[in-house]
Image (cartoon, rainbow, N blue to C red):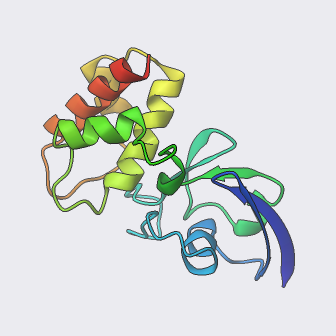
Amino acid sequence: MKRISVTVNGVRHEAEVEPRTLLVYFIREQLGLTGTNVGCDTSSCGACTVHLNGQSVKSCTVLAVQADGQEVTTIEGLATNGKLHPMQQAFHEEHGLQCGFCTPGMIMAAVGIVDENPDPSEAEVREALEGNLCRCTGYHNIVRAVISGAKASV
């Protein structure tokens, strides 16, 4: 076992983890934050996307020990004082979801996209989201939501 200290959504957590524990399982099972989903365990779907030190990462590709001393933001950490983050609000308003399973990862990826490019085109959004899969939609409303969220974040 390895002792780690990780700040998740602004709260410092110290825990014992097996060195092979993936960050997604640490977040879900040890911290009880179940908004980050496990989709494929192979980094193909993006359902587990979180921010590690402000960068979008697929938490099924990061070991919890690699996050030691780092800052992690999950979907639960985006809202402030009960108010949705502009990207969360945009996904709601633009109906950027169907079943909702991929939505947390999509939103986290979208925030990362807009952090890097505050005014993305439709083509840029589609290309940037290629690592996040949705099995329900044709991505049209998701792309609209990202563009709308980008405008609201300015």
In this image, 9 relative to 80: left or right? right
Q: Residue at x 65, y 61 (%)?
A: 62
Q: Residue at x 17, y 36 (%)?
A: 94
Residue in front for this viewpoint, 85 or 113: 85
Q: Is residue 129 visible?
A: no
Give the vertical position of 21 relative to 43 (above or below).
Answer: below
In this image, 49 relative to 92: left or right? right
Residue in front for this viewpoint, 71 or 11: 11
Q: Position of residue 31 (x, y in %)?
A: 62, 74
Q: Residue 123, located in which quarter of the rendered image? A: top left
Q: Residue at x 45, y 30 (%)?
A: 113
Q: Quadrant of the image for the C terminus?
A: top left
Give the vertical position of 98 relative to 95 (above or below).
Answer: below
Q: Position of residue 121 (x, y in %)?
A: 30, 16
In this image, 151 relative to 9: left or right? left
Q: Residue 15, located in which quarter of the rendered image? A: bottom right
Q: Residue 27, located in which quarter of the rendered image? A: bottom right
Q: Quadrant of the image for the N terminus?
A: bottom right
Q: Position of residue 122 (x, y in %)?
A: 25, 22
Residue in front for this viewpoint, 81 or 130: 81
